Image: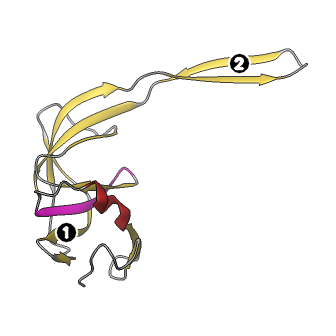
Amino acid sequence: MTINKNNASLIFNKIKNIYVDMSILDSMPDDCKDHAVVELCGKQYNVFKGAVLALEKIDGDVGEIVECGKVLFIKTGDKVLYNPDITVQAEILEQKRDKKIVVYKKRRRKDYRKKQGHRQSITIIKVISC
């Protein structure tokens, strides 16, 4: 399967029965030749060697190498390919919590106010190989 940016904004991968959002290819640096679209934590990410990503919490210790689950496709040069044997490896750089989000609920004239805070646990990873 060979496609390029201009074909469509959303490509259906018939082999895996999933949709791939092609608009994430726009965030690619021009000097990077090889990259992949990977599904992690229910979201699609455009990854290349050396990319640093902030994801939802992944189990593992700092310095541990993890393999990314679903590789939707990989681009080398001008060709876009699908190969089920390709894996993407990443190193866990940091396990931390994101900034606090304040959730405030109010019902007018009912004397109901509720203030709640939430901090999402996140994992910072660096892609080692594509």
Q: Dot 2 corresponds to which residue?
A: 114
First in sequence: mark 2 vs mark 1: 1
The residue that appears at 20% across and 40% down in the rendered structure is 125
Q: Position of residue 103 (x, y in %)?
A: 61, 24
> Which quarter of the figure has residue 72?
bottom left
Quick one: quadrant of the C terminus?
bottom left
Q: Quick one: quadrant of the N terminus?
A: bottom left
Does dot 2 land on a helix, a strand or a loop?
Answer: strand
Q: Secondary structure at mark 1?
A: strand
Q: Is residue 38 above or below residue 8?
A: above
- Which residue is painted at 19% across and 69% down in the image? 74
Three-letter code for the amino acid on which mark 1 is drawn: Ile
Residue found at x 91% / y 19%: 109
- Mark 2: few/some/many CA within 10 Å (<14, 14-19, 20+): few
- In the image: residue 24, left or right of residue 65: right
Q: Which residue is mark 1?
A: 74
Residue 29, image x, y percentages: 18, 54
Category of crowding for the residue at label 1, using alpha-carbon neighbours closer than 10 angstroms: few (below 14), some (14–19), many (at least 20):
many
Amino acid tagged 2: Lys
| Magenta part of the chain | 33-41
The mark found on residue 59 in the picture is: none
Query: Which dot, 2 or 1, sits closer to the camera?
Result: 1
Give the farthest residue toward the right.
Answer: 109
Task: Give how far across and how far down residue 24 sits, in percent.
Answer: 33, 59
**On the picture, is 100 further left or further right than 14?**
right
Answer above or below: position of 121 versus 3: above
Q: Is residue 40 magenta?
A: yes
**Decide: marks 2, 1 in contact (CB < 8 A)?**
no
Q: Give me the residue at 28% from left, 54% from top.
A: 27
In the picture shown, does residue 49 fall above or below 94? below
